[in-house]
Image (cartoon, rainbow, N blue to C red):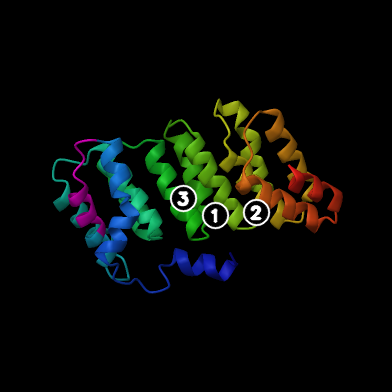
Amino acid sequence: CTQEQSVAWHNGNPARRFVPAQQCQSALCRGSAEDSWPGVKVDGIQSVLQQLSRLEAPLLPDVVCDTLDKAFPKGPDPRDSTLILSGLAKLRLLETALLTLSWHEVNRYELNYYHYGAVIDACAKTCAWTTALQLFHDMAQNKLESSTITFNAAISACEKGDEWERALHLFSEIPRSSVYSTEFTYSGAISACRKGGKWQEAMQLFRIMMQSKVEPSTITFNPSISACETGGMWESAFYLVAR
């Protein structure tokens, strides 16, 4: 993402638009939510997503809070919060997601790494890597443990912001956080190195992944091969293709 795109997204542009009900339902992953959390009122959550998506710019905090207060007069179930924040992330409504997170904090409603991970993911989708890192560090200040979810989202945000050094720094913190890495963790870090022209670092990450017995797939092979091509390391690229 370019700096101009990042600023545009963070300021709420392009202009907020009406999001069709079908898109809200798709963002909610209805089937997955019902299977994972029996008892969750998916139709109600979808309705809240629609209401939030219809709010027009400039987005006023009081309007968002009023919408959420009416939807959850006794406070949201943590699972409801996860679905709403994840849905807002998929709809790329970062500003709304940030205000929703703030609403939780002000009312002292439960927040966990699923919630922060969803908002950091919204940052990644809208090129707001600085906000993603701020949220990541806010978790530590609020004494919330990091997780694979939050690390992956933060690394992805740095990758999309062309911040390969910050992505590698986050990756280096994982062992000290007692968090396990997945293929998505490695893919984000490798892609960040590829975009930064750091093919040697990308290949080192791939070797670490293989040693850690994380099963590679196309999401890790593709950026690794591309990094080799960028560095003119055709033999390494052919080796990866052969695998």
Circle on res. 129: 1
Q: Quadrant of the C terminus?
A: top right
Which residue is most to the bottom?
A: 15
Magenta part of the protein: which range?
Answer: 38-49
Report the residue marked by disc 3. 121
State yes or no: discs 2 and 1 in contact (Cβ < 8 Å): yes
As drawn, the label of residue 163 is: 2
Element assignment for label 1: helix
Q: Is residue 138 left or right of residue 202?
A: left
- Residue at x 30% of width, y 36% of height: 36
Which amino acid is tagged 1?
Trp
Q: Is residue 108 visible?
A: no
- Rounded to the nearest whole Å, what is the CA distance between mark 3 and mark 2? 16 Å
Q: Amino acid at mark 3?
A: Asp
Queried whether the magenta region covers residue 111, the answer comes back as: no
Query: Where residue 106 appears, x then y in whole percent?
Result: 28, 44
Q: Earlier in the sequence, mark 3 or mark 1?
A: 3
**Which quadrant of the view contains residue 143?**
top left
What whole-number distance in Å separates the C-alpha atoms at marks 2 and 1?
8 Å
Query: Does residue 43 show up magenta in the picture?
Result: yes
Up the image or down, 25 lies above or below 173; here it is below
Asked whether 171 or 63 is in front, the reply is 171
Helix, strand, or loop for circle 3? helix
The tag earlier along the polypeptide, 3 or 2, is 3
Residue at 84%, 53% in the rendered image: 234
Amino acid type for the residue under numbered disc 2: Glu
| Helix, strand or loop: magenta stretch | helix
